[in-house]
């Protein structure tokens, strides 16, 4: 029995090593994405389609135009109305909730991109925000082994200097507990995102994302984000959101402001 | 333009094109309205997810403490702020987008220190 177990373990290890060797590049072949980076522009996810132009995520009436199905267009419109009423809270206001994918590619503060042969890690300072992209030759888990998580499961490979990866297993928004941005966009648990991440010049990284979602989208939705390299020596810091969160959410979804006496300043708390 | 001014201008441009750091909806603030508070600093809370500047305004003996929200210390520190930028007792003018409901809170725009005349944030 013991021999059989050892043989099985050796077999698993051998398969794992072989899988890793299949596509894992040597460290020297990997691009240099070191340093600290900042997303260029505001946090509207799809700035190419936002109306009004230069509208800010969270401002009343600002929206994008992805190819939404009727069902998800209705959800979006409902959320837009909640924004107008001031009752559409950002789920990350409850400190500890991750931005999720693809929103993690669309956040303020700064980023670091840690590239290793086996995986690339997107480290968003504003968080918690970590996306793990495995490049060790593994495949996505089969559907029955996946469940919806904020950041999903990302697997990719290198095509020259471009990291190409697909993200699956994303959490479906339930009462807007995960959003794409503050305009009120949400996706379903059928969402899959194919991302091409590359350095376009010494100071610019670019992520081209194609979102497919059989429930929420009628067609693939392409969104491009860019990140500017900050001066050498720039620091990224700890972001302890719960350190002093003075913005709890009321029962109706209103974002409150805590005053110096520990109670809401707001005149109407519901 | 002096070197210092050029650096300051470049930093301002970078700050203006960078996404604003906030961890919550800004629906409570009236960004069409600006209120200038003239008072003294009670405390600056140099904490995530936002810094808070507590400003006491004395209006003919009627003291009101305002809670002024800024960005994260992370992003502000990269734009020249320090945990000691506002100190207890500093006499200041602080401009804010106030809360829509008239409560004594607002979103930081800029400030001027009365003793030194120095400004921070947007102060035109």
Image: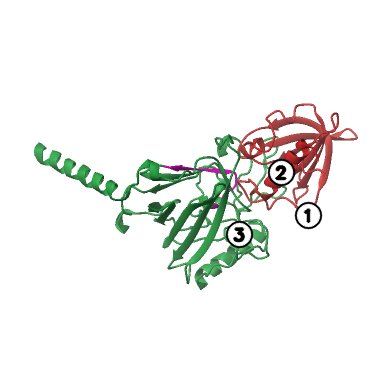
Chain colours: A green, B red
Residue A231 part of the magenta-drawn span:
no
Secondary structure category for the residue under label 2: helix
Name the quadrant of the C terminus of chain B.
Answer: top right
Q: Which residue is mark 2?
A: B10
Magenta highlight range: A106-115
Crowd band around label 2 with a 10 angstrom C-alpha radius: few (<14), some (14–19), many (20+): few
Q: How far across and how far down the image is residue B51, in percent?
A: 67, 37
Q: How far across and how far down the image is residue A195, in percent?
A: 45, 57
Secondary structure category for the residue under label 1: loop
Q: Which residue is mark 3?
A: A183
What separation in Å lies between label 2 and label 1 (alpha carbons)? 26 Å
Query: Looking at the image, can residue B106 be seen?
Result: no
In the rendered structure, the answer to whether residue A138 lies left or right of residue A180 reads left
Quarter of the rendering containing residue B72: top right
In this view, the residue in front, B29 or A6, is A6
Q: How far across and how far down the image is residue A254, in percent?
A: 63, 52
Residue at figure coordinates x 44%, y 55% from the top left: A171
Query: Looking at the image, can residue B13 be seen?
Result: yes
The numbered disc on residue B32 is 1
Query: Would you say the residues marked 3 and 2 are in contact, meaning their CB atoms lie under 8 Å apart?
Result: no
In the picture shown, does residue A75 fall above or below A41? below
Secondary structure category for the residue under label 3: loop
Crowd band around label 3 with a 10 angstrom C-alpha radius: few (<14), some (14–19), many (20+): many
What separation in Å lies between label 3 and label 2 (alpha carbons)? 30 Å
């Amino acid at each position: 029995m013991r021999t059989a177990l050892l043989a099985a373990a050796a077999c698993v290890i051998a398969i794992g090593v072989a899988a890793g060797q299949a596509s894992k590049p040597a460290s020297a072949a990997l691009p240099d994405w070191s340093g600290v980076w900042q997303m260029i522009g505001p946090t509207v996810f799809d700035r190419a389609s936002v109306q009004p132009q230069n509208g800010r995520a969270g401002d009343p009436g600002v929206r994008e135009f992805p190819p939404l199905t009727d069902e998800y267009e209705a959800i979006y419109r409902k959320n837009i109305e909640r924004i107008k009423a001031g009752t559409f809270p950002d789920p990350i206001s409850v400190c500890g909730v991750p931005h999720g994918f693809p929103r993690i590619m669309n956040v303020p503060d700064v980023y670091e991109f840690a590239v290793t042969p086996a995986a690339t890690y997107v480290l968003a300072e504003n968080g918690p925000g970590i996306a793990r992209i495995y490049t060790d030759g593994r495949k996505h888990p089969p559907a029955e082994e996946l469940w919806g998580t904020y950041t999903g499961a990302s697997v990719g490979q290198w095509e020259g200097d471009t990291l190409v990866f697909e993200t699956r297993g994303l959490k479906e928004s339930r009462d807007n507990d995960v959003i794409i941005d503050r305009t009120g966009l949400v996706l379903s648990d059928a969402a899959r995102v194919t991302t091409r991440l590359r350095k376009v010049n010494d100071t610019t990284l670019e992520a081209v994302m194609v979102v497919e979602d059989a429930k929420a989208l009628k067609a693939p939705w392409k969104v491009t984000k860019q990140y500017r390299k900050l001066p050498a020596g720039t620091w990224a810091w700890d972001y302890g959101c719960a350190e002093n969160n003075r913005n709890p959410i009321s029962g109706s979804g209103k974002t409150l402001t805590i005053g110096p006496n520990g109670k809401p300043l707001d005149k109407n708390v519901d | 333009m002096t070197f210092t001014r050029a650096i300051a201008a470049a930093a301002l441009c970078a700050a203006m094109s960078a996404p604003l750091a906030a961890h919550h909806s800004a629906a409570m603030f009236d960004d069409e309205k600006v209120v200038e508070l003239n008072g003294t600093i009670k405390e600056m809370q140099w904490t995530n997810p936002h810094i808070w500047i507590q400003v006491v305004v004395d209006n003919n003996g009627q003291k009101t403490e305002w809670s002024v929200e800024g960005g994260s210390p992370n992003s502000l520190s990269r734009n020249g702020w320090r945990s000691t930028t506002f100190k207890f007792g500093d006499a200041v003018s602080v401009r804010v987008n106030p809360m829509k409901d008239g409560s004594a809170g607002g979103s930081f725009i800029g400030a001027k220190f009365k003793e030194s005349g120095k400004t921070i944030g947007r102060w035109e």
